Image (cartoon, rainbow, N blue to C red):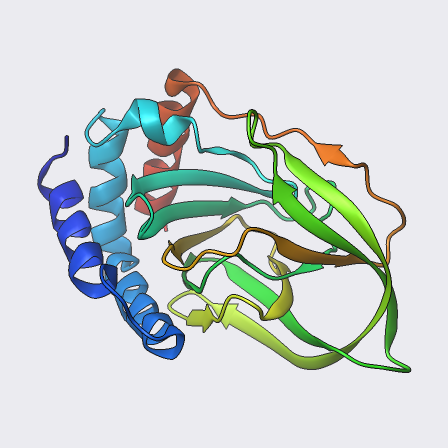
Amino acid sequence: MGGRQVLAARRLLAEALDGELPEHERVLAARSVVAELGSPDRLLELTAELASGEGDPDGCARYSYRHVLGFDKLLLIDGGPHHMLRAHLWHAGRGAIGKEDIHNHRSPLASYVVRGRLAMELYAPREGGGIEADRYRESLAEESADWLLEPTGPARLHLTQVAEYAAGSTYALPAHTLHRAWCDTAEPTVTLFLETGNGRREHTDVFTAAGPHPGSVPKVPLDVADYLAELDALAELLRSS
């Protein structure tokens, strides 16, 4: 179920993240691991190995898709309930449903910018003033895993931080942190994204000022051939970086 790079990555993830950790310790551990695995040479070797069919291409393809926030999401290693390691490929100017949405996550996360650049804004709720937004409760459909969006009323948010993350940068966020991120360069941006699994929330919160969202957004997984082709293209992009 894996070549040398796949097995080494799985071992590192398990050693750092399996077991019970307080959220602040899990965030720090995830940030350290994703920085180690995201170094360009190591990620290139891992991606090339996966593109050759190592790992679990059938299982990972089922959880790889074009994300509604405007990037391609490729699952590299599925650690079950404990962690999921993904490569995100961001294309500047790609329009998508929800691209401007502010959201949080089901569990703590960490990300390493491999190439390109991301911009990020952090937000917090407030009683008055700030940004007017519509709030949704986002969950996953049981049979299809499509995104379900249930409107929960108006909200107000205020911007708390603006940041840029160039290649070689890492960031890590607790699950409830409200944020939005986007590709901040004309060139494709690649990030290595690590989602930790223990204590996952059943839903996330989504805020938008862009008007009503549909109640359901389909999640269309890649087939195995397309998944392997995307990994191969990612490996070529990393070689040219």
Q: Is residue 47 above or below residue 124?
A: above
Q: In this view, does 3 lie to the left or right of 225?
A: left
Determine which quarter of the picture holds residue 158: bottom right
- Residue located 23% across and 59% down the image: 18
Residue 82 at x, y percent in the picture = 31, 53
Q: Is residue 11 left or right of residue 53?
A: left
Determine which quarter of the picture holds residue 196: bottom left
Residue 69 visible within the image:
no
Q: Which of 167 and 76 is in front in this view?
A: 76
Residue 233 at x, y percent in the picture = 39, 32
Q: Which of 99 and 203 is in front in this view?
A: 203
Q: Is residue 4 above or below residue 119?
A: above
Q: Is residue 229 left or right of residue 149?
A: left
Residue 178 at x, y percent in the picture = 64, 68
Q: Which of 37 and 218 is in front in this view?
A: 218
Determine which quarter of the picture holds residue 35: bottom left
Q: In this view, does 43 lie above or below 27?
A: above
- Residue located 26% across and 64% down the image: 33
- Residue located 18% across and 50% down the image: 9
Q: Quadrant of the N terminus?
A: top left
Q: In this view, does 14 lie to the left or right of 150?
A: left
